[in-house]
């Protein structure tokens, strides 16, 4: 993937401003999940590599040309490679990993490394990255933490994730440094397990409306 393509992926996320964080236990849920997200007006997903079904589910979702799909909870260079082979167009980690960042650079795929401190932000900047995932955002101070980081790092793009729901979504969206907001409430695991894809679509539609109102 070229540098232009890498920046293009981040630009796509910035246009959508929302990133559903998905835990899939059963690959049979992948196709109806894709349909629900598209029907709800949000053509993207971060499939977390937390279950045995994750890679195959990612492959199914990524096969849809209308979806921008990435891999989350990537803990090792091997996982990054497997995810990219499955079709992931971006990689997300829960914390900083020099090895994963370097492997993503070699693979030519954008990475959103998890950070929780200014020191980790500096490491990301030193590695040539300008966008990070703030995790777990809720425990770190929520929107106030994002605002605090914007002071010393004015050019930093932030994707806050962790402990975010519809009640505080707007507070994050109103911050100019927030590229997109990651959250699992739209695709909660219990909704997938119970086959409640209409509810996934409804929650997604509601979140998309909130994004439009925030612009």
Image (spheres, grey):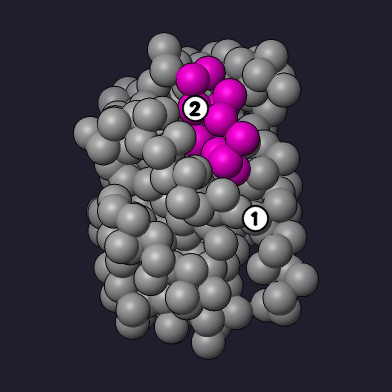
Q: Residue at x 49, y 27 (%)?
A: 172
Which disc, if any, is residue 10?
Answer: 1
Q: To which residue does mark 2 refer?
A: 172
Q: Is residue 68 above or below residue 143?
A: below
Single out the residue that lies furthest toward the left: 139
Q: Badge 2, how many Cα within 10 Å: few under 14, some, many 20+?
A: many
Q: Is mark 2 on a helix, strand or loop?
A: helix
Q: Which residue is drawn at 73% across and 60% down?
A: 8
Q: Is mark 1 on a helix, strand or loop?
A: helix
Using the image as rendered, state which of residue 121 and residue 168 is in the foreground.
121
Q: Distance between the residues labelled 2 and 1?
A: 18 Å
Q: Which residue is drawn at 68% across and 28% down?
A: 41
Using the image as rendered, state which of residue 154 and residue 169 is in the foreground.
154
Question: Is residue 143 toward the left or the right of residue 96 in the image?
Answer: right
Which image quarter is the N terminus in?
Answer: bottom right
**Depth-wise, is mark 2 or mark 1 nearer the camera?**
2
- Assess whether residue 52 is covered by the magenta stretch: no
- Assess whether residue 176 is covered by the magenta stretch: yes
């Amino acid at each position: 993937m070229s540098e232009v393509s890498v920046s293009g992926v981040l630009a796509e996320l910035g246009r959508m401003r929302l990133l559903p964080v998905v835990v899939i236990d059963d690959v049979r849920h992948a196709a109806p999940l894709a349909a629900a997200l598209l029907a709800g007006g949000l053509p993207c997903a971060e499939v977390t590599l937390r279950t045995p079904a994750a890679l195959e589910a990612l492959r199914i979702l990524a096969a849809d040309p209308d979806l921008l799909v990435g891999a989350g909870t990537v803990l090792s260079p091997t996982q990054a490679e497997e995810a990219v082979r499955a079709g992931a167009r971006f990689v997300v980690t829960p914390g900083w990993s020099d090895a994963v960042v370097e492997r993503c650079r070699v693979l030519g795929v954008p990475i959103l490394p998890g950070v929780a401190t200014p020191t980790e932000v500096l490491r990301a900047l030193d590695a040539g990255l300008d966008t990070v995932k703030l995790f777990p955002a809720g425990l770190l101070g929520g929107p106030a933490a994002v605002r605090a980081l914007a002071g010393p790092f004015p050019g930093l793009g932030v994707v806050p994730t962790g402990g975010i729901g519809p009640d505080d979504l707007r507070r994050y969206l109103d911050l100019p440094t927030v590229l997109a907001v990651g959250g699992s409430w739209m695709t909660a695991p219990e909704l997938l397990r119970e086959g409640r894809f209409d509810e996934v679509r409804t929650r997604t539609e509601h979140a998309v409306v909130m994004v439009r109102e925030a612009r």
